[in-house]
Image: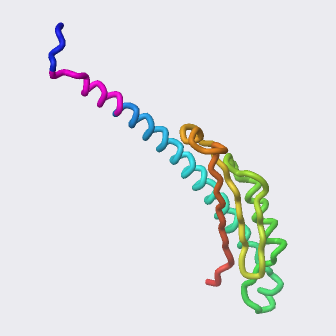
């Protein structure tokens, strides 16, 4: 078939560009979804550990009529126990940090996700994030 003078292959060039754009957008969205998903999972883990720690009440003070307060060693032990029982900690890096006082329990987790597509455009090929949760006893 003879090529006409006004047909220069511009549709082919446009199609190749569109496919390249779709591959890039797909890889970008896949990496972002993995980071979002792992961050959400670690945030839920931290929330659960902080809520478990908030159950570590100081029963002596409560029975003495001093109100509802936490017993820091018990609260931290409950938070650590909950963290040890969590199974969705794939992105967890390093040791969690659990601290408590008379009024609240704080849990901090650091996560990291290796990038697949976007890793080619970054120095270390990973995204690190920190999630924090706090909880305390509520009267009611």
Residue 69 or 129: which is nearer the viewer? 129
Percent from the top left, x then y, of residue 7? 18, 21
Residue at the spot 72% in from the left edge and 70% down from the top edge: 106
Image: 126 above or below 100: above
Percent from the top left, x then y, of residue 51? 67, 68
Residue at the spot 64% in from the left edge and 84% down from the top edge: 139
Residue bounds of the magenta highlight: 6-17
Q: Main secondary structure of the magenta part?
A: helix
User: Residue extending furthest bottom?
Assistant: 65
In the rendered view, does 77 fall on the left or right side of 107? right
Image: 110 above or below 22: below
In the rendered view, does 92 fall on the left or right side of 30? right
Percent from the top left, x then y, of residue 112? 66, 50
Question: How is the structure coloured here?
Answer: rainbow
Q: Quadrant of residue 11?
A: top left
Percent from the top left, x then y, of residue 66? 77, 91
Residue 88 appearing in the image: no
Residue at the spot 73% in from the left edge and 89% down from the top edge: 67
Q: Quadrant of residue 1?
A: top left
């Amino acid at each position: 078939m003879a090529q006409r003078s006004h047909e220069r292959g511009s549709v082919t060039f446009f199609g190749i560009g569109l496919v390249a754009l779709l591959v890039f957008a797909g890889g970008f969205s896949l990496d972002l979804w993995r980071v979002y998903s792992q961050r959400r999972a670690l945030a839920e883990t931290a929330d659960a550990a902080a809520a478990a720690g908030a159950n570590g009440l100081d029963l002596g003070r409560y029975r003495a009529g001093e109100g509802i307060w936490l017993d820091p060693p018990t609260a931290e032990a409950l938070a650590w126990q909950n963290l040890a029982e969590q199974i969705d900690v794939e992105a967890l890096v390093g040791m969690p940090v659990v601290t408590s006082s008379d009024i609240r329990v704080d849990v901090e987790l650091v996560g990291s996700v290796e990038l697949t597509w976007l890793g080619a455009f970054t120095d270390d090929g990973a995204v690190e994030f920190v999630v924090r949760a706090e909880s305390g006893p509520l009267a009611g």
